[in-house]
Image: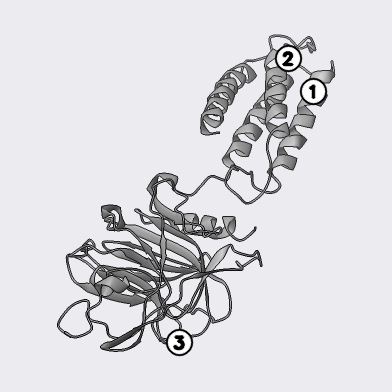
Amino acid sequence: MKIVKYIFIVFVVSILLVTLSESCKKDSGTQQNYNADKTRLKELIDSLTNVYNTTTEGTKPGNYAVGSRAALDSVINLGNQVYNANTYTQQEVNNSSYNLTVAGVTFQNNLIEQVASTNLIAFWQFNGNAIDSSGNGHDGILQTNYIGKAGAPVDGGTLPQLANDRFGRANMAYHFTKGATIEVPYSGAFVPQSLTITAWIKMDSNVNCANYFFSLNRWNTFKFNIQCDNFLLFTAHTTTSYFDKDDNPGTVTPGQWVHVAVSYSSGLEKFYINGVLTKTWTDVTGTLVPPSPVMNLTIGNEMPKSVYNASNTADPNYFWGSDAFWGSIDEVRFYNAQLTDGQVLSIYTIESTP
């Protein structure tokens, strides 16, 4: 798709340059000459007609923005009128070619592409499984995990359960209760210099007043969770310090599907709800500190069950009580770049329709 797109743009731009050159020539006589050369006009009409006939509008990558095909078709029809009539001068034919060229470039710019695909570390769509659809192989493993009070962990004995997604489709999201966790085997790629995390979440209630839904080594590397007042909270342990930042005044309402996102780079952190920027922080610095020893990334909980210590409060992995997420999670994306506001909005728009 991309190769075809760029070849087409090179073609139309070259036509545009020639068309503009010829359109600027002065008419040598006062008598109109309607014996125009329409070769390039025909080439453009045929090329754009083929593009029109082989494309689809929608909100997903590979689609074109709704309304873009109608705009292209309108210009093609005008081009056909010029081509089929013998009452147009060469300059008018060239002008029609120019209009087609501009319409073609505009149409190609309306192509919806996967957002920052080269920066995508992992993408867990949860379409019946916990496989990473990015192609990077970071597949999730369903696990039980602990519940209970500090120093007294009890295995919740419950795996994440397939559930309805935000469109009511069965088995297209995961529901988490009683410490249920999806673990993703550790990779150095999980500790990038900059990051963006996006997900759809539906919190059952604020059971634990913490609700970790995406975490690596909890506050000792990073965690993304919902705190007591239903604000999003991101903690980053960096080479500079520990940074706990929330998205106040943005809130997450229990019982509703919400698209949430956070991005971090040294000097800038941003929160988003439903594609809208809710909070910006600039007093954050440094790069993330990797977990030591390494441990798996967790979705739906703060840490893997296997790393907890229940007896020594000085241990950084001490079990301080369950901070697991209770609710449903879907469409989790993890990037190694700080996405722009427009890119976060694009993800929300793409994922807002089935």
Mark 1 vs 2: CB contact within 8 A: yes
Q: Please report contact status of discs 2 and 3: CB closer than 8 Å, yes or no.
A: no
Q: Is residue 310 left or right of residue 120?
A: left
| Residue 83 visible in image | yes
Residue 250 or residue 39, whichever sits in front: 250
Give the Cα separation between the discs numbered 3 and 1: 68 Å
Which amino acid type is marked by label 2? Lys
Quarter of the image for the C terminus: give it: bottom right
Which tag is nearer the camera, tag 3 or tag 1? 3
Q: Is residue 119 above or below residue 251?
A: above
Q: Position of residue 197 (x, y in %)?
A: 41, 62
Horizontal arrangement in the rendering, residue 291 relative to residue 83 (left or right) = left
Q: Nearer the viewer, mark 2 or mark 3?
A: 3
Q: Which residue is mark 2?
A: 38
- At horizontal 22% and vertical 61% (from top left) the residue drawn is 287
Relative to 153, does residue 57 appear above or below in the rendering?
Answer: above
Circle 1 crowding by C-alpha within 10 Å: few under 14, some 14–19, many from 20:
some
Q: Amino acid at mark 1?
A: Val
Q: Position of residue 318 (x, y in %)?
A: 22, 81
Q: Classify the position of the N terminus by image quarter.
A: top right
Pointer 3 and pointer 1: residues touching (CB < 8 Å)?
no
Give the residue number, with chain letter if any, for mark 1: 82
Q: Quadrant of residue 246?
A: bottom left
The earlier-in-sequence mark between 3 and 1 is: 1
| Residue hosting label 3 | 207
- Cα distance, mark 2 to mark 3? 71 Å
Of residues 182 and 60, which is closer to you in this image? 182
Residue 163: x, y in percent? Answer: 58, 69
Q: Secondary structure at mark 3?
A: loop
Q: Residue at x 55, y 21 (%)?
A: 14
